[in-house]
Amino acid sequence: MEKLKIAGGYSLKGTVGVSGAKNSAVALIPATILAESPVIIEGLPDISDVHILRALLEEIGGKAAFEDGEMHVDPSTMISMPLPNGKVKKLRASYYLMGAMLGRFKKAVIGLPGGCHLGPRPIDQHIKGFEALGAQITNEQGAIYLRADELKGARIYLDVVSVGATINIMLAAVLAKGQTIIENAAKEPEIIDVATLLSSMGAKIKGAGTDVIRIDGVEKLHGCRHSIIPDRIEAGTYMIIGASMGKEVIIDNVIPLHLESLIAKLREMGIHVETSNDQIMIVGIQKELKAVDVKTLVYPGFPTDLQQPMTALLTKATGTSVVTDTIYSARFKHIDELRRMNANMKVEGRSAIISGPSRLQGAKVKASDLRAGACLVAAGLMAEGITEITGLEHIDRGYSQLEEKLNGLGATVWREKLSEKEIEQLQNL
Ligand SMILES: CC(=O)N[C@H]1[C@@H](OP(=O)(O)OP(=O)(O)OC[C@H]2O[C@@H](n3ccc(=O)[nH]c3=O)[C@H](O)[C@@H]2O)O[C@H](CO)[C@@H](O)[C@@H]1O
Ligand SMILES: C=C(OP(=O)(O)O)C(=O)O
């Protein structure tokens, strides 16, 4: 086990390259199961979610090689092997194996997913969609059993706008007989990316990126090559870091349109942001920053995945900021850790209330989930002295080459092994 150490308080400058999007990658990899011939995905991030999904493709008999960001998958030898436990619990997106395996094999056994604990994360809308397509589904001792004699297209209205349910139903529907219509679909860029891959494989999908998606089922899908979109959440994290400590930080390989809500908030705070085709330049603090209110919403609203890093930046703003998460009821485990670092903030219901400015101090803190980790990294860079962050397994689910990228901007960040005493202390927490 390791900890991340940050010597904070130094300004940052330079260019940081953004990796492929985690939330696309974790759907694109299971989508390859649906093809009859090899699929190549390029630009994948080097994160644990990608490595685990690659291993899961091999567990069901496929061949999957991952090198230099490129994954070569040969799905022709895959079988519907049950995956009730083990690796599926290490990430959220293992739920996409349900849609993809149901689509190809008409049966699957998949353990309930893991991922960040952010309050209740049901999958009832995924199940509702699969059932509408004709699947029988049971939950037996924490594993979902899915089976269908055949899948038939259906009209499915999502009661909750869900990224996962939208993609999972698309995966199950592309090989179903007839037309499927998903209404009240989520519109995140990652959904368009998955639809682009499926279309290159021969699927017929219209409307991805709008709230009505129409899928005309086809008999079979073939291999192709696909290039992933950049990670807007990783990009947003570096924008927030640049805004808090940057003299001038350029975020490269980004689609500025995907980050309009964050760009608008940073400008509202008084931060200078410039955009070009595939770059965003942040000129950090020139003057006093203004406190702002932030409310997370489905895309194109402010992403919940940037809510936690944003609270670190808001400790620098003068006045009171209110950050409300409308997507997850309990995405505030980072707040106690920020308080250890001298932040003045509290949680009230679904909101964090931040009074600033505060001078953050380095401390020993623990990442409870992925973006709590990103928030603590941002706070550690801002704080005076040394910050030590444990819980790196969460951060490694979503940030490719974190230390290399930060040190490339002039930060001082490194990993150290935890002593036996530290491991014991963590286990007793
Ligand atoms: C792997 C992946 O892409 N993860 C992202 C995905 O998670 P995920 O796909 O799990 O999130 P959803 O969009 O499904 O969840 C949105 C909201 O709907 C609720 N809900 C969802 C499904 C369902 O069947 N029933 C239900 O009630 C959830 O509890 C949550 O309150 O979108 C989230 C919201 O942008 C992001 O935070 C995650 O980073
Ligand atoms: C919540 C997240 O991930 P997951 O859905 O994979 O747990 C995230 O990426 O912030």
Image (cartoon, helix red, strand yellow):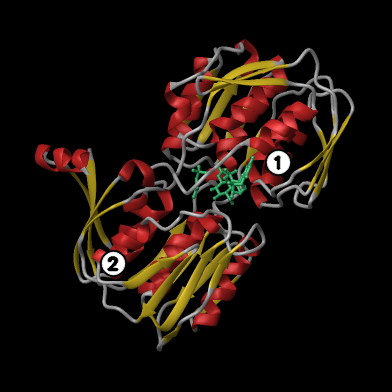
SS state under label 2 = helix
Q: Quadrant of the C terminus?
A: top left
Task: Tell me the residue at 22%/37% (across/down).
Answer: 1
Residue 36 appears in the picture as rendered = no
Q: CA distance from mark 2 to mark 1?
A: 37 Å
- Give the percent coordinates (x, y) of residue 252: 51, 60
Dot 2 crowding, Cα within 10 Å, few <14, some 14–19, many 20+: some
Q: Which mark is residue 283?
A: none
Q: Earlier in the sequence, mark 2 or mark 1?
A: 1
Left or right of 246 in this view: 98: right
Q: Is mark 1 within 8 Å of ligand 1?
A: yes
Looking at the picture, tell me which residue is in the foreground, 380 or 318: 318
In this view, the mark in front (2 or 1): 2
Task: Tell me the residue at 46%/77% (across/down).
Answer: 321
SS state under label 1 = helix
The residue that label 1 is drawn on is: 166
Looking at the picture, tell me which residue is in the foreground, 183 or 279: 183
Left or right of 83 in this view: 401: left
Name the residue type under label 1. Answer: Thr
Left or right of 108 in this view: 103: right
- Give the percent coordinates (x, y) of residue 234: 48, 55
Task: Tell me the residue at 47%/35% (across/down).
Answer: 114
Left or right of 135 in this view: 296: left
Name the residue type under label 2. Answer: Arg
The residue that label 2 is drawn on is: 339
Looking at the picture, tell me which residue is in the foreground, 161 or 346: 346
- Give the percent coordinates (x, y) of residue 244: 38, 73
Q: With respect to residue 372, does 260 lie above or below?
A: below
